[in-house]
Amino acid sequence: MRTYSGPFKIILTCLAIFWVVFQLYFNTIGSMEAISFRAYHSLFLLIFCFCYFPLYRKEALNRKLPGIFDFVLIALSLFVFMYFILNYPRIAMAGGFVTQAENILGILALILVFLAARRAAGALVWLALIFLAYNVLGRFLPDGPFRLASLSVNRIVGHLFWSSQGIFGTGIGVSATYIFVFILFGSFLNKSGFTNLINDLSLTLVGKTAGGPAKVAVLANGLMGMINGAATAIVATTGSITIPMMRKAGYSKEYSAGVVAAAASGGQFCPPIMGAVAFLMAEFLGVSYTVVAMAAIVPAFLYYFGILAAVHFKAKSEGLSGLSMENLPNAIQVLKKEGHLLAPLISLLIIMFLGFTPLFACVISIFVTIACSWLRKETRMDLSKIINACEEGVRGAISVGVCCIIIGVIIGTVSLTGLGLRFGFQMLRVVGEGELLKAGVMVAIMSTILGMGVPGIASYVIVTAVAVPVMINAGAVPIVAHLFCLFYASLSNITPPVAISSFVASGIAGSNHTKTAFLAMRVALAGFILPFFFLFNPILLLGTAPEGSTVIQVIISIVTASAGILLLSSATEGRFIRKSYWLERIVCIVAAGLLIDSSIFTDNIGIILLVLLILFQIYFKVDKKKKA
């Protein structure tokens, strides 16, 4: 990302502050027609994208001014989007009728969006280009379910730009509300010293245990990922502290980077905030935010429990100890010194549970962050820190926001061509009603592919439009189908070949990108398996248990699933009570699958295998000691 010096830096800072005030005002007490608000948001995104993101990879990033081409693109963006804002009410009243000149402006707008996406959205721009080409070239496909009737350019442009179904649709609506505000909230927390508080608290909790620094990395990245939702941004910030800490403790470069990438990616399905996805999912499902947050508690716990178990077994295998007591902060002293920084999170939850909107609660919590930082001199946010937080929030929102704009091309194509229905019909022909396993496999693959190189919340929106109806038709509970898609969309951040979170982490650690990505997948293996278990056993999602389920059954299911996750991590790292041989690792995998499944029969067999494994390992451990 570019950096500027001189007068233009001041201009960008003022513009960033203005945008922050604009967003906060119209997301709370202000009032503006939704399409106009989204158009303004898109305009700001394009301006900052063309300023901050380089035109080509090897250009000089320290500059005094953007290039001439950048200024041309900014000027065109201002003209096109302001024309849209000023004229959309007239066009809407006319039933969407536009002139030929306005169609040309629509084509220009789409070009500007793709140019911005090429810089900031990575591989997603090529996916969007394929969808756009389908609108034009679909009529040339062979006879079959995906062949289109002829669509005129005017109709395509009218749908993708001059309506609320294209680039000004759901994707940018999410960016203009939840994503921007929560990323801004995360930047204010970061500048207030909240990240240091999380690290210190994590150290007091698990720092002295085997592999303590790695467990600190898991907790810190998970907690920050839950708030921010942007996994790559969390890796870049928290990872710069936790990766060197793990390296110093004795973990390899690849393993350190992989753990951090896996932990940060899971924050997007970790309640209570879930990186703003919880609020979006609640809107899609037509349920309260509390229902979504409750349903995600157990899967998120099992995911992070699996990572913590993996790094623990790895530490035992490598003979790595925790940090010494003299190097650990005192929990009471940490809370005395920095505990006031927890106030924003507490205020966020209290305000939401009082019935106010998440956006209102988040905006109030931003001001609470500033206010509580003034309680101690060490954390006090002066004017320069507040301005830096605004700038950091704006920069963090650009790439995700541009992804959301370009997603509008994909979703717009799906609605214009009926591609979602066509694709869903074909999937149903393959899957068939009630074939939940087959539907799950297909959706998992599709979610992972569509999510590669795309922020988790953006890939979730894409997959939801196409896959969720298919899963529901195959027999999935709606909220389970949404969480299933969210898991795989989020974990695409660590799935090769793109694995963008792993790429950022490997850059910090100086490790091999591909090895890092595969190690991240190994550490997060539970996350790739869990969705299939709660797909068939909704009892693992609090509040969605089948009728007749008792509290005792729910607790037993959670306990046995936790034991299964522990065994799965043991199998991947090759250690349980002692080093495991290949046959013992196979037993661990089999027992893990049986225990994660919530039926009484499989749980009983899994418990028997677990007990036998423990006795076997203890016996041979003692026997070896006697022989020695």
Image (tube, grey):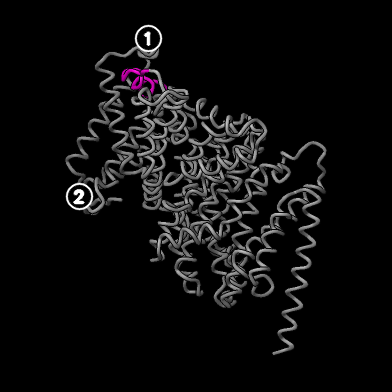
Figure quadrant of residue 102: top left
Within 10 Å of disc 1 (Cα), the crowding (few <14, some 14-19, many 20+) is few
Residue 500 x %, y %: 42, 52
Query: Is disc 1 in contact with disc 2, using a CB cutoff of under 8 Å?
Result: no
Residue 354 x %, y %: 65, 36
State the residue in front, 380 or 91.
Answer: 91
Left or right of 448 in this view: 593: right
Q: Which residues are magenta?
A: 150-164
Give the numbered dot on residue 94: 1
Relative to 400, residue 376 above or below: below
Q: Which kind of residue does numbered mark 1 sit on? A: Ala
State the residue in front, 244 or 107.
Answer: 107
Give the numbered dot on residue 64: 2
Residue 504 lies in the magenta-colored region: no
Residue at 50% across / 26% down in the picture? 422
Residue at 39% across / 21% down in the picture? 159
Left or right of 2 in this view: 92: right
Residue 507 in view in this figure: yes
The residue lying furthest to the top in this view is 94
Give the numbered dot on residue 156: none
Residue 500 in view in this figure: no
Residue 27 x %, y %: 47, 32
Label 2: which secondary element: loop
Label 1: which secondary element: loop
